Amino acid sequence: MGLTEISKYIALILRHKPEAIGITLDEHGWANVDELIAGISKDHDFNMEMLEEIVRTDNKQRYSFNEDKTLIRANQGHSIPVDVELEKATPPDILYHGSAVKFEASIDEGGLIPKSRLYVHLSKDYDTAVTVGSRHGKPVIYKVKAWEMTKDGYEFFLSANKVWLTKSVPVKYLEKI
């Protein structure tokens, strides 16, 4: 298994299934680095140097170490209830959401909901939204009226890797591009 595959496996573990390798996360989503390495090493060649390389080179900056690198966590995208200590932030006036055409009717009818995740993920730029939407087929892009949502009392958070998060986006704040 190469570093890309191991990185995806780490995302599965730290976001959704820590029990897959017999570890637990604390209430803030932190896992013990030694336990993570030991759990992955049972079935794959894996060590601290490889983990550091994955964290350092991940193009989406999915993971964070604590200061002494004894703990690691996913920055967002969890389906298990953790508090990754997100700080409220004021978003730009407009954000974007990329999805696949196959989900378009559902979004047009019910807005954006987090599904299995804790938050809806939004991008600050159109190009990122296209990239995200393309992962699941032909993309459809929505402009999110974040300023109006903020004015109406909705909260936004900015993750450590600069993804905008909110609990949901009702249809009235969406405009298909």
Image (cartoon, rainbow, N blue to C red):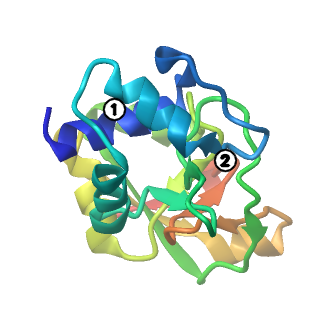
Q: Which residue is mark 2?
A: 168
Going by the numbered disc 2, the residue's amino acid type is Ser
Q: Quadrant of residue 156?
A: bottom right
Front residue of 162/137: it is 162
Q: Residue at x 59, y 31 (%)?
A: 79
Q: Is residue 93 visible?
A: yes
**Relative to residue 131, is residue 97 drawn left or right?**
right
The answer for how far apart the CA atoms under marks 1 and 2 are is 27 Å
Front residue of 35/142: it is 35
Residue 112 spot, x, y in % from top left: 56, 44
Nearer to us: label 1 or label 2: 1
At numbered mark 2, what does the secondary structure look like: helix, strand or loop? loop
At numbered mark 1, what does the secondary structure look like: helix, strand or loop? helix
Q: Which residue is mark 1?
A: 9
Dot 2 crowding, Cα within 10 Å, few <14, some 14–19, many 20+: some
Front residue of 124/21: it is 21
